[in-house]
Image (spheres, rainbow, N blue to C red):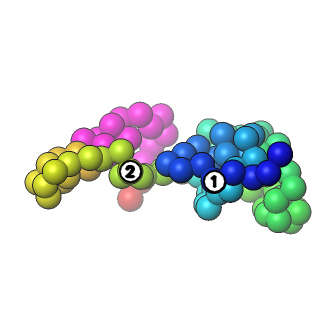
């Protein structure tokens, strides 16, 4: 089956399992949420390097996308972004340090 372009899909796992084109996968590669999911990276250049394989799934990663924030004006967009950030951080189970 030929690779397809999946418009609007940002889920790396879905893109790999359905043989779609993708750009970017750092969240899935480094995040400890995906520890042990090396199968997603088999056949990719990053997986050929042993140094990188040892790093897969070892870090707490915060992934932020505002693709789901829809607004008709600037003020509503800012409110939507703030709500999204609050939801994102309230969902984390690891301590954050700045």
Residue named by callout 2: 67
The residue lying furthest to the front in this view is: 2
Q: Is residue 56 left or right of residue 39?
A: left
| Residue 92 x %, y % | 44, 37
Image quarter (top left, top right, bottom left or bottom right) of the C terminus: bottom left
In this rendered view, identify the residue nearer to me: 5 or 16.
5
The residue positioned 16% from the left and 51% from the top of the image is: 72
Residue named by callout 1: 5
| Residue 73 x %, y % | 13, 55
| Residue 40 x %, y % | 77, 45
How far is mark 2 from mark 1, CA to CA? 18 Å
Image quarter (top left, top right, bottom left or bottom right) of the N terminus: top right
From where the camera sits, is residue 16 visible? yes
The residue stretch that appears in magenta:
83-96
| Residue 63 x %, y % | 48, 51
- Please tell me whether mark 1 sits on a helix, a strand or a loop: loop
Q: Does residue 79 show up magenta in the picture?
A: no
- Please tell me whether mark 2 sits on a helix, a strand or a loop: loop
């Amino acid at each position: 089956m030929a690779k397809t372009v999946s418009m609007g899909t940002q889920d790396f796992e879905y893109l790999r399992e359905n043989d779609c084109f993708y750009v970017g996968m750092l969240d899935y590669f480094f995040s400890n949420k995906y520890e042990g999911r090396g199968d997603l990276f088999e056949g990719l250049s990053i997986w050929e390097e042993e140094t990188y394989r040892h790093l897969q799934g070892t870090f707490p990663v915060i992934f932020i996308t505002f693709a789901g924030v829809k607004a008709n004006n600037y003020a509503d967009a800012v409110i939507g972004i703030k709500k999204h950030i609050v939801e994102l951080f309230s969902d984390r189970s690891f301590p954050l340090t700045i």
